[in-house]
Image (cartoon, helix red, strand yellow):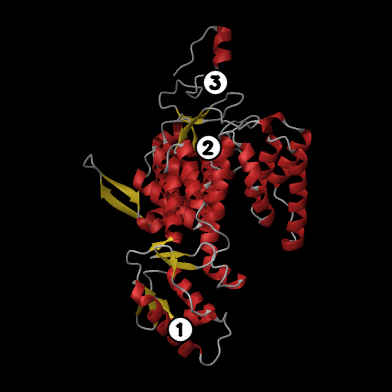
Amino acid sequence: MELQLLGPFAVLDRGRPVLAGLRRQERCLLAILALEAGRTVPTGRLIDLLWNGEAPAGARSAVHTYIGRLRASLGPDGVHLETRSDGYLLRPDDHVFDTRAFEDGVREAAAAVDDEERVRRYDRALALWRGEPLADVADEALRDRIGRRLAALRLSAVEERARLLLSLGRHERVAAELPPLAEERPERERLVADSMVALHRSGRPADALRLYRATCDALRSAFDAEPGRDLRTLYDQIRRDDPALRRPVTPVYAVRVRGEWLPWNTSGDPALEFCNTYAGWSGERRPGSEWLRGYRTLAVWAGHLDLLDDRTATRLLRRAEEWPEEAGTVLAAAREFRSALYACVVEEGDGSGGRSFGRVAEVVQEAMRHAVFLRGDDGLGRWSPGPGSGLRLPLHAVAQRAADLLADPRRLTVRVCPGKDCGWLFLDAGGRRRWCNMGVCGRAAAEADGRRIPS
């Protein structure tokens, strides 16, 4: 049996519709149970959803009647509704749910290493959407209540797919598909920004500027808000026909891992590498100097530096797709920790070092509350982030390494590369290095007086 919820609700038996004769409210009840297939939905919640908090006196009896009619209609086709305590459960059995296929497809796309393959998997997953979920059985208020997570996951997938297509130079495809959705969701500024970039690269700057102005009007009308700084900057760049917008920006000194640009390793210590994603270039910011662009980058980075194993990183990516708001909160916390750790390590002269240490210590203590002590393959014990960390696991992992560094005399050997466009942090235990190991910093100075740059 196939249950389709991503659009008008349908239950098909080898392509044959089987919901004929059922009332709208009964089909709505079945759809709610299908969204929660395998989990018991309490009768009270079903009543609240079906009548939107304004249930009549006989609502509970009505639900029992609906369940009886659904069992009589669908039982012969193998769809089983079970009574569990004060609720009901739809047994998933071997039925096919387009919602689950969509979620699995998004997870597979996020886990793919090759960008082309990621785009293909996003295409397959997004093709399952046939319109507004449950468009024929639920009103807008109910769809928002029961389908919010799926809708957010879809938008995240659309944004990630657009970013990939732009990085692959397929701006015409993005320009043809994305702007209508960006107009519908002006609060998703990443959708708007990617649409504007695609339109500009497709030779349609006037349309890009028109989309920006429409977004401004919509934000003011619906949210009494103005576009963010990044979107305003993009608007100015398009008006000036900034050459940097005409092609995908490739970060400087970066490696591509699981579709994410990550910085070269320069310091030999994960805590300093985390700071380096912030310090980047001390002069004018170059493309890619801000590496920590999203939660996905954070999780992939932690896996790349062996702070997490690949399986854990993939699991976190899946959960981040399902809970984008929580992932965004963790990303903001990671950026704050990164800034505090950098200030703490370099002990900036404005006296912020002590305050920064306190902020770092708070995160370290939080990480240790969730830590577990495990025996590694080498036979040595070590503290590792525990499963209770949830999406904060990458942050807790780097916080533990930061604690190791700050408690070690090596901390006193941290240096800041004085390169004009650099600023990377590195360890100089021998006291003989001045430059980082980029291979370009200090080269001009060394060549001028015939010296060799220490490695």
Q: How many marks?
A: 3
Q: In the rendering, at what x and y percent does residue 450 appear?
A: 53, 6
Q: Residue at x 48, y 67 (%)?
A: 10
Callout 3 secondary element? loop
Q: Are marks 2 and 1 in contact (CB under 8 Å)?
A: no
- Residue farthest along the bottom direction in this orientation: 57
Q: Residue at x 51, y 43 (%)?
A: 341
Callout 2 secondary element? helix
- Is 251 above or below relative to 196? above
- Is 43 above or below relative to 272? below
Q: Which residue is mark 3?
A: 441
Q: Amino acid at mark 3?
A: Cys
Q: Residue at x 74, y 57 (%)?
A: 218
Few, some or many C-alpha atoms within 10 Å of disc 1 (few <14, some 14-19, many ≥20)?
some
Left or right of residue 451: residue 73: left
Q: In the rendering, at what x and y percent does residue 234 appear?
A: 71, 41
Q: Amino acid at mark 1?
A: Tyr
Q: In the rendering, at what x and y percent does residue 387 appear?
A: 36, 56
Q: Which residue is mark 1?
A: 66
Discs 2/1, front:
1
Q: Which residue is mark 2?
A: 277
